[in-house]
Each structure stands twice: as structure tokens, then as C-alpha cells.
Amino acid sequence: TRPSDIVTMLNGQTVEIGNTDAEGRVILADALTYGVGRNPAYMIDIATLTGAAMVALGDRYSAVFSNDKRLKDLLVDAGAEMDDPIWELPLHKDHKEKMKSQVADLRNADAGTSYLAGASKGAAFLSYFIKDAKGKDAKWAHIDIGGTAYTNDPRKYEQKGATGSGVRVLLRFLEGL
């Protein structure tokens, strides 16, 4: 895609490409649409979606955004247990508003202020793709591992390089269901 292209998503919404470097969220959005069609009890995605998560939380905490307090709490608790900490960042209606476009339904990056609350706005974009066929939001959480997926300062059980961030969290979460 090129800047200003408009693409039609799996759920029929149109997206203006405002930033070609924010392509991962466009792909992930269609995966969420596909997943919500399977009527999951919970829907969790993990992605190195933004560098803004690393700016906000450093390289030891992943960011979590969720529309379901219980799901968020279970993930945060699992992260604490597994020494793979997660911190909730805001997912506010203002962040969602910033993702609306004048020429399409949405933009993949907001116009002019994408450097402000970038991790929240990335999650806000994704939140438009979690509605089922009846228009009800799935119980959803997005974990942004932009700062934790790779390390040059490994913990005692890690090596330099890829960390597997989020894997231990998901395993503990699933064990608790």
C-alpha cells in the first residue's frame, strides 16, 4: 500500500493508510475479525505493534489493553506470576475517535499526533475489529510486546535476543481457565 490508499477490511470497514509503517495492525485487524467470527470465550492477541509501548514501559513490561476487566486482571496476574510483567495502558474513547478518517471509516494511524499515546491508538484501531455478527464486542485483550520481545539485558533464564515474551503469560492464563 501507499500513503492515502484506502483498503477494505474483512469486516467491510474501509481504512485509509496514513502510515505505511503501521501495516501490522491492518493485518492483525483482519485476523481479529476472523477470530471473533468463531465466537471465542476470550480473544487475546500479542504483537510487537508499537515502539510507543517500549517508550512508555521500557523493556521489562508489556502493555495490555482490554475491554474486559476480568480478562485483563487474569493476564496481569499471570504476568506477575511468570516474571513476564504486564501493565495496563489506557484505551479511551478519545483514542478511538482519533482513528476515524474523513475519507474512509478509519485510519491506520491518526493524522498529525500519532506520536502521542501511540500504543493506545494502535490498540484503539484494533478495537474496531472485535464485534461479532450481532454487533457485540468479544471479550478481548491486546498485549503489545514492542519493548519486551527482544533483549540485550537478559534475565538469568534468558539469552540475548528474542525473549518469548507473552508465551509464559498465555500458558499460565490457560492453565487457570
Image: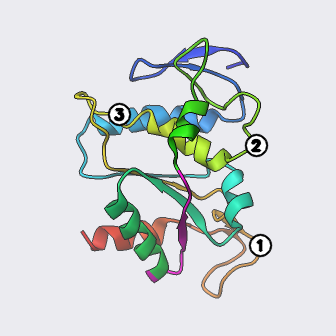
Name the residue at the top extreme. Answer: 103
Magenta stretch holds residue 82: yes
Question: Which percent across, then down, holds residue 84?
Answer: 54, 75
C-alpha gap between disc 3 and disc 2: 29 Å
> What's the magenta region?
81-90
Say which residue label 3 marks. Answer: 34
Q: Does the magenta stretch include residue 102?
A: no
Three-letter code, disc 3 = Tyr
Q: Which residue corresponds to mark 1?
A: 152
Which residue type does callout 2 highlight?
Answer: Tyr
Left or right: where 171 falls relative to 21: left
Location of mark 2 (residue)? 115
Indicate the quadrant containing the C terminus: top left, top right, bottom left or bottom right. Answer: bottom left
What is the count of numbered marks?
3
Q: In this view, does 2 lie above or below 36?
A: above
Cα distance between the residues tagged 1 and 2: 25 Å
Q: Nearer the viewer, residue 153 or 68?
A: 68
- In terms of secondary structure, where does tag 3 sit? helix
